[in-house]
Structure formats: structure tokens, C-alpha cells
Image (cartoon, rainbow, N blue to C red):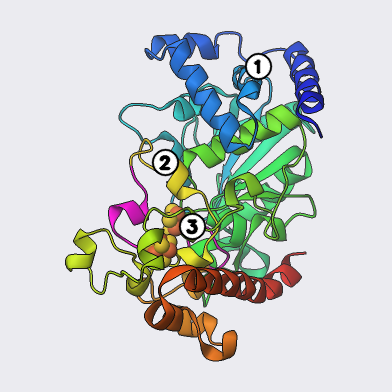
Amino acid sequence: MKDLDLFKRLSKRLDNLEKLPKLDEQKSIPKVLQEKGISRREFISWATSIAAMLSLPASFTPLVAKATELSDRLPIIWLHMAECTGCSESLLRTDAPSIDSLIFDYISLEYHETLMASAGWQAEANLEHAIEKYKGNYILMVEGGIPSGQTDFYLTIGGHANTGEQNAKVACEHAKAIFAIGSCSSFGGVQAAIPNPTGAVSLSKITNKSVINVPGCPPSEKNIVGTLLHYILYGSLPALDAYNRPKWAYGQRIHDLCERRGHFDAGEFVEKFGDEGSKKGYCLYKVGCKGPYTFNNCSKNKFNQHTSWPIQAGHGCIGCSEPDFWDKMGPFEEPVGDKLYNTVFGGAGADATADKIGVGILATAAVGITAHAIISKVKNPIEDEEH
Ligand code: SF4
Ligand code: F3S
């Protein structure tokens, strides 16, 4: 679709959204930003960066700003399953709130166990009430893997001892859109790691409805907020990859967006943590970096108020946004090459590539092709199970 057509379509969508009543008359994003000392200029510059992240031209910035301001029109229910709350923390835990975390404060979170004041019977009643009141109209965000089947009792919540699986199923049934936030909800995560004693599964395994996965351990706040804003803007699902991850966020490999990539291509590697190569910022492949097999935009968004990300901090990527990373990417500080790569190019895997080819375009292309081939190889069994 041409930019102008798209602009018109999104404008119309936002105009319609604007006609819906605000869910809380006391709140307004411009007011919140003003109270926190964030200027309009900073807000617009943030909206420009979100537009770029969603692969929209800069001319769409006013639409992104408007979508943000309209984020109070859509009720959100956020459920916690078996997890560490790290995904909520990714968004909220900050000594100087970013615009992303402020927006999260501002949107209409009808139910969020970490943030709401109520507990026990009252909390359960709130959840039932929110589902009933906004039936068919709320956005459901779920954090955590879900103990299911015969072992669903490993996660029970509240006075009625509903299992997480029961709660999630009911909430999915009446949701307008469903987002699995984090690798646990997207793929089962560490809960589902072998031998998976609680029978934890991804959200997509307990519902027949479409689930948009936003994996990461945790995902960046930008990917969470961006997914929400994309939905507000378009009112439909984004382009998704084979694992139902939005392509705008998970369409490229860590390896292809990495600031150390020049060192990989030049055959300059950290051989041991703390060595001279470490000090020079060399490539972390030989100390276990899984960037060649991992799809995410961490180097663009970063974490901790956008200050750093794992590879910048000196540790390799552990592949946390990939399915079953806990089982497939380990040991985290050793190259996984032989385990994954030996089936391709007659056994000349990534280790061989890094050690023996290691320099220039040939190595780059070989690893790129290999990673994609391997990823589709390890992907298929899971896809078969999930779909
Ligand atoms: Fe970056 Fe890791 Fe790729 Fe090296 S192997 S270039 S550290 S992503
Ligand atoms: Fe996870 Fe790798 Fe990013 S470990 S946070 S996908 S750099």
C-alpha cells in the first residue's frame, strides 16, 4: 500500500478510536508527560523513533503521537502465569521513568496483579468484572508459561484456586487481541525447560485464537509498547514471522545488527572473558554468543533506559527470544556450533567458519545462510506442535 493510502487508513482508524469514551477521565497523556517534566518536543522525538521502529516514514510521527494519546481508549488485562515478573519489570523498573514506562502507567490497565492495589477475593472479582465489562473489546497481555493438562495445579491463583490455565483460557476467549509477553508466555520459557515438571506450555497452546508473541527474557520495553501501539494504529495483526513474532521487531538477526560484527568478519574474537580481545570489544562468538541464531532488535532498542544491551556489556547473546533457548542454546558461554551446525556444509559449521574461514564476506555469508538453514531446521518440530 502506498504511504498516502496507508496514512489515510490509519488516520481514519484513529478518528474512529477517538470517538470511543476515555476509560478514565482523570488521566491524559499530555498531562502525565507535563507532570513528569517531559516536553512536547521530547515526546514527538520519541514518537519519531517509534515510527521508525515500526518501519513507518517520519511523516507518520503525528499518527504515532495520536495513537499514543488514544491508548486510554482500549482496556488492557495483564495476566501473570508462571514467571519471574521480569517482563513487567523491564517496562516499569526505572529510577527515571522513560516515555515508554509512563505510557504503560497511563494506559487503561484494568487488571495487573503486580500493579493493582487489590488482593485475594477482591482481585479475583476485579478480573471477572473486567472480562465481563469489556467482553470482546479488551487487549489481553499474558506474562509467563502456563502449567497445563494433568499438572495445571502447579499454578493456582486466588481464593477459588483457579488454575492459571483456566484463567488464561477464559481471558483469551473474550479478548479482542492477545499478546504473549516474554519468552515464557511465547514459548514456555525456563518453566518448560527439560524435564518440564509442571507441564508448562506457551499461551498459544491453550487457545485456538491468534497470539502475537513478543519474546525475550525480558523483551525490551520498546518492543512491548511498540506492539501495543502497532495494534492501536492498525487495528490488525502485524506481519509475523514463523513464530508469530512481529517482523518489525524480530525480522533481523542479532548478528546482523551487532556493533561487534566487524570483528567477527575480521576474525577477531574474545578467546576468554577478561582477555585482551575483551578489552578491545572483539566478537564474543567463541565465548558463547548466540547472536547468529537469534532474531531480535536489542542493539537498536537496548535496555535500562536504552543505555546498554548484553553484547555491549561484554557477554554474548544467549538467544533469549528464541523458542526453547534454555535447552537449545546452552551452554551459554560456549559456542553451540557443533551441536547446531554440523549438518550443514558437510560439517563445516560456524566454529569452523569462525576459526578457519573467519575473515570477510565469505564467512559472513556462510554463517548467515547456515543460521537460517538451521533455524528452520530446529523450528519445524515446534511449528508442527504449535499449529
Ligand atoms: Fe556480535 Fe555475537 Fe555476532 Fe559476534 S557472534 S558479531 S558478538 S552477534
Ligand atoms: Fe536476549 Fe540476546 Fe537480546 S540474550 S536480550 S536476544 S542480545
Name the foreground residue: 140 vs 296. Answer: 296
Callout 1: SS: loop
Residue at figure coordinates x 23%, y 66% from the top left: 277
Quadrant location of ligand 2? bottom left
Q: Where is the C terminus found, in terms of image quarters?
A: bottom right
Depth check, mark 1 against mark 3: the one in front is: 3
Q: Residue at x 61, y 30 (%)?
A: 126
Which sits in the foreground, 101 or 309? Answer: 309
The residue sitting at 75% across, 41% down in the picture is 237
The three-letter code of the residue at mark 1 reads Leu
Q: Secondary structure at mark 2?
A: helix
Residue 318 visible here: no
- The label shown at residue 23 is 1
Q: Amino acid at mark 2?
A: Glu
Residue drawn at x 67%, y 13% as measured from the top left = 22
Q: Quadrant of residue 47?
A: top right
Q: Mark 2 = which residue?
A: 89
**Residue 356's image quarter?**
bottom left
Which label was assigned to residue 254? 3
Depicted 286 relative to depicted 105: above or below: below
Left or right: 53, with 318 as reference point: right
Q: CA gap, disc 1 to disc 2?
A: 24 Å
